[in-house]
Image: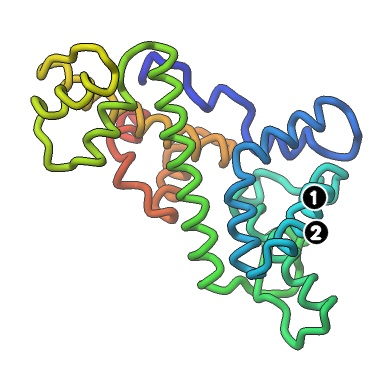
Amino acid sequence: MPDEQRISRIETLWSVVRTAQGDDSMDSRTAMQQMLDRYGTAIRRYLLGATRDEDLADELFQEFALRFLTGKYSSADAERGRFRSFLKTILFRLVAEHHRKKGRDKAVAMGSQFPEVADDAATGESDDGEFNRLWSDELLKKSWAALQKLEERTGRPLFTVMQVKVENPTLRSPEIAELVSERTGKELSTGNARVILHRAREQFAELLVDEVEQSLDTTDVDRIREELTDLNLLSYCKPALERRTS
């Protein structure tokens, strides 16, 4: 287990759901803002893709935030499903309500294990795939951002080394060391570049697993592996999961 501070030490998304309900307290508003800061981009991107209308997507986003904060989804339970599925169902319902209000013949196909969100429809595979793609993108972005913050905090060029390697996948350690030295203004040897790249990959995987872990409200490795598989992210994280198992 890495010695750096783990994302999973912050509140889980399910604990945010439980906190941001039913009152106008500072804790409630803070919890709501925490959730929106982490996944607001994915929510907006999904709503924009579903409506093809920026103004409408913003309107639905505001409606989602209002319902969340006022306790609309307070009976949701982490034991009944993943936060991703919980959130996806809410968004499907919002879009479906819009279509019904506009007199459309067919509402957006959707389904849920949360009856207070939706109780009589089936989720379309295309919607599942698109939402999962957006969710995966956000998890990767959060992990990259966390790695960058770790570099800023420790002074170790974990983010920069890995970024150079991703941008230039054919580069060898000497070239990586040279580019990183140019970007950071600090000399990096070939040997250190090799070691830091290995460490950066390990740390990135840990950060990504932490992101998934705190969205599931569990440390169960099998459930985390299943979620990573569903999101096509398992290839990044196999060694990290093995370390947690051992």
Residue with the mark numbered 2: 116
Q: Residue at x 44, y 13 (%)?
A: 153
> Along the polypeptide, which appears first: circle 2 or circle 1?
1
Which residue matches tag 1?
73
Residue at far right of view: 23
The location of residue 162, given as percent across then percent down, is 27, 31
| The C terminus sits in image quarter | top left
Q: Mark 1: which secondary structure?
A: loop
The three-letter amino acid code for the residue at tag 1 is: Tyr
Residue 106 vs residue 241, the one in the foreground = 106
Percent x, y of residue 53: 68, 67
Q: How many marks?
A: 2
Is the residue marked by circle 2 packed among few (<14), some (14-19), or many (20+) residues within 10 Å? few
Name the colouring of the figure: rainbow
Q: Which class describes the residues within 10 Å of circle 1: few (<14), some (14-19), or many (20+)?
A: many
Q: In which quarter of the image is residue 47?
A: bottom right
Question: In this image, 195 relative to 158: left or right?
Answer: left
Closer to us: 184 or 235: 184
Q: Is residue 203 above or below residue 135?
A: above
Give the residue drawn at x 59%, y 36%: 217
Q: Which corner quadrant of the image does residue 245 belong to?
A: top left
Q: Quadrant of the N terminus?
A: top left
C-beta proximity under 8 Å, tags 2 and 1: yes
Q: Is residue 36 left or right of residue 63?
A: left
Residue 37 location (% of width, % of height): 64, 37
The residue shown at (39%, 52%) is: 229
Q: Where is residue 228 in the image (x, y as percent from the top left)?
A: 42, 48
Q: Is mark 2 on a helix, strand or loop?
A: loop
The three-letter amino acid code for the residue at tag 2 is Glu
